Image: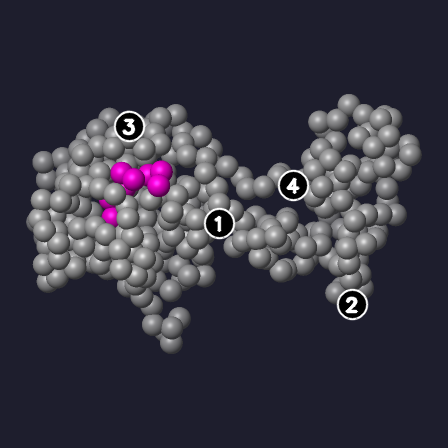
Amino acid sequence: MSFSNGPNGLPPGGGTGGGGSGNNFHIPSSRESCNSPVLLQGIATPQTQKSMARVQGSAPAVAVANLTTGSSTQSVAPVTAVGPTDSLDCSAEVLSAFECPVCLEYMLPPYLQCQSGHLVCGNCRPKLQCCPTCRGPTPSIRNLGLEKIANTVKFPCKFSNSGCGSIFHHYDKVDHEETCEFRPYSCPCPGASCRWQGALQEVMPHLIKIHKSITTLQGEDIVFLATDINLPGAVDWVMMQSCFGYHFMLVLEKQEKFEQSQQIFYAVVQLIGAKKEAENFIYRLELSTNRRRLVWEATPRSIHEGVAHAISQSDCLAFDTPTAQLFAENGNLGINVTITQVNESLR
């Protein structure tokens, strides 16, 4: 299935808006690269019924840690905070004194200089054999005077070119940049095999072009059918859901807990959007069969945060293999997924 856009910029799928039956969809190859298509069947149903997609999981490649955005930052030594009234204006002339001659990022305390007074940032210094400015010995002399001045200066966010207009003292700058909404987005496909990064508005075009095998259903109430949940090892099942003018990524991830000798399933919904936008929605996951029901409701995670972060915070539906078998039928697990838009007056 191609990932071409439909009305309102939403990609077509086996949605609640009708469509003929017998449509063929493709699924991602889970944590490998989501590029190798595997046949998936979707069922388009009338508007009075839920859309359903049948998703088959596959074993992952060796997982790679999520990429950090931008250049790394050095740890900041504790300092006494200086009030805003004592801050210097963030002028280009003042800030130029804090630019590292190697990476051109703003240096943060502690500051080390060479015998000639040339500075270099703490990230670049371990990689140098000499001063990059005068070719003398590597900077190793503490510049306490500049550190006092730095306590009065406000630095712009490193993502200012992407639209962030905030400025901070050096002791607040690093914390902000770790969660800045203007930092680059990574590919949201699980497994980190794809190393793409870009702006938020480029995420969906990337998925459309590179990860064509991901199934997309339209409508706020659908059924996500994960097939072959008894596959050995770690497995991911992934699909997209489009509603309310937004795109959501549904992920069911199975991990092996060797220390506990068991397998755990994690189900979470991510918004292809910023954290503030995600707060406008609630998602509901429900497993039900034979008078049993397991329900999870939560606010979607922004893809900025990622599935791994949601799992580490226990902010997802989690259940073990025996529980999964209670709700599975012939090795397939159906999850009812409902997205609700929150009334602004209730937030």
Tell me if 22 is positioned left or right of 274 in this view: left
Q: CA distance from mark 4 to mark 3?
A: 35 Å
Residue in view at x 9 percent, y 59 percent: 46
1 and 4 marks in contact (CB < 8 Å):
no
Tally the marks.
4
Sequence-wise, the earlier of marks 1 and 3 is 3
1 and 3 marks in contact (CB < 8 Å):
no
In the rendered structure, find residue 199 and report the number of the disc placed on it. Answer: 1
Q: Amino acid at mark 3?
A: Ala
Sequence-wise, the earlier of marks 2 and 1 is 2
- The residue that label 3 is drawn on is 59
- The magenta span reads 209-216
Look at discs 1 and 3 and give the one toward the viewer. 1
- The residue that label 2 is drawn on is 85
Look at discs 1 and 4 and give the one toward the viewer. 1
Determine whether 344 is above or below 198 in the image. below
Work out whether residue 307 or residue 98 is closer to the camera in this orientation and state it.
Answer: 98
